[in-house]
Amino acid sequence: MNKSNLNSLAARIKDSFGCIPDPGDDLIAPGDRDFEKLRIARRFRGLHWSQVDTKLLADEPDALYFLSDDAFRFFLPGYLILALRDRAGMDIVLDSLLSSLAGPVYHEERLGKLSREQLFLILEVLDALSPEVDNPDYWDFEHAKRGVLRIVGNDRPS
């Protein structure tokens, strides 16, 4: 996908995900005694998804696993756009994103509240980033796509 198409896809993500409410600082990663959740909550506190950068995500590559369902949906567009713009910088974080999208852990709770348009945009991002079939990472992308398709159904537009 060329740079113009990637920018267009990023703009569509911004528009589509703009309606997702900020969960608030107290609901980023609730868990009073869980060290990992407390650290993630501190790192993401006060941030809008558009303020998340590759350095923060590289420092906290597993953050998606600790975010609440609402925080996952809120920060997801930041992850998607950064993956489109800086795939190399998102290398380790991309593994967490793919795993989170593949499910099945918390899958319905996290993705089930997204609109069909948002789910289809996630699939577009996965298609844009997916390597060739002979690349070992190809199957991680295919599992993530299947995870999203389980939520949206198999009537994916062409």
Image: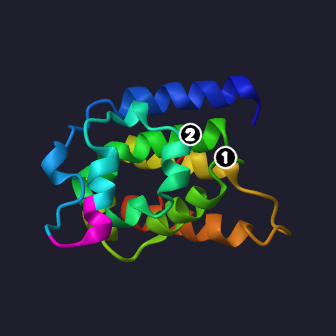
Q: Amino acid at mark 1?
A: Gly
Residue nearest the viewer, comparing 131 with 115: 131
Q: Is residue 114 visible?
A: no
Q: Quadrant of residue 46?
A: top left
Task: Give the residue at x 21% y 38%.
Answer: 22
Q: CA distance from mark 1 to mark 2?
A: 9 Å
In the displayed structure, would residue 82 be above or below residue 99?
above
Q: Hey, which residue is sitting farthest bottom in the picture? A: 104
Are discs 1 and 2 less than 8 Å apart at CB?
yes
Residue 69 at x, y percent in the picture: 25, 59
Of callouts 1 and 2, the N-terminal one: 2
Residue 55 at x, y percent in the picture: 55, 43
Q: Quadrant of residue 36?
A: bottom left
Residue 72 at x, y percent in the picture: 32, 53
Q: Which residue is mark 2?
A: 82
The reply, left or right, for residue 19 in relation to residue 8 is left
Q: Which residue is mark 1?
A: 89
Q: Is residue 36 magenta?
A: yes
